[in-house]
Image (spheres, rainbow, N blue to C red):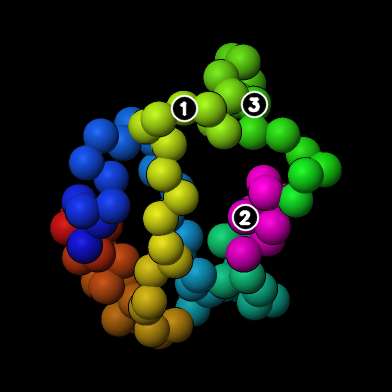
Amino acid sequence: MFQHLMPNSKISLVGVPFDAKSSFLTGSSEGPHAIRQTLFSGVSNLYSEIGVDLDNVDGFRDLIDLKIDNSDDGYIQIEKEVAK
């Protein structure tokens, strides 16, 4: 699924919008959107803890969010999609 998008990638961001097994409140499925919104907002920066600027790293790719069912079958879908 992702090989054509990241032939030389060293760091890849893949969103997994999934909260089927959340204990009380749902909402973790909104996490990938919130992470990207923060990363690319201009308010934060893309420097890592060790000083690497991810905005200037050729191997960094922001891939897509996985399209998965928000059910128990979602676990199987996640494993299959990430393994591709």
State which mark lies toward you, 1 or 2: 1
Q: Amino acid at mark 1?
A: Val
Q: Which mark is residue 47?
A: 3
- Quarter of the image where the N terminus is located: bottom left
> Relative to residue 33, is residue 7 drawn left or right?
left
Are there few (<14), some (14-19), or many (20+) residues within 10 Å of tag 2?
few
Q: Quadrant of residue 35?
A: bottom right
Residue at 25% x, 71% y is 76
Inspect the image, locate mark 3, and give the three-letter code of the amino acid beneath it: Tyr
Mark 3 lies on a secondary structure that is loop
Q: Residue at x 49, y 72 (%)?
A: 18
Residue toward you, 52 or 66: 52
Expressed as whole percent of the image width and height from the top left, the position of residue 44 reads 77, 39
Callout 3: 10 Å neighbours few (<14), some, many (20+)? few
Furthest toward the right, the residue is 43
User: Which span of residues is magenta-colored?
Assistant: 33-40
Question: What is the spatial separation of the Cα atoms under label 3 and label 2, in whole angstroms?
Answer: 14 Å
Q: Looking at the magenta stretch, what is its main secondary structure?
A: helix
In percent of width and height, residue 38 lies at: 72, 51
Image vertical order of residue 2 relative to residue 25, above or below: above
Q: Secondary structure at mark 1?
A: loop
For image coordinates 64% across by 77% down, the residue present is 26
Q: Nearer the viewer, residue 21 or 9?
A: 9
Query: Between marks 1 and 2, how big is the CA–CA gap?
Result: 17 Å
**Disc number placed over residue 57 in the picture, else none:** 1
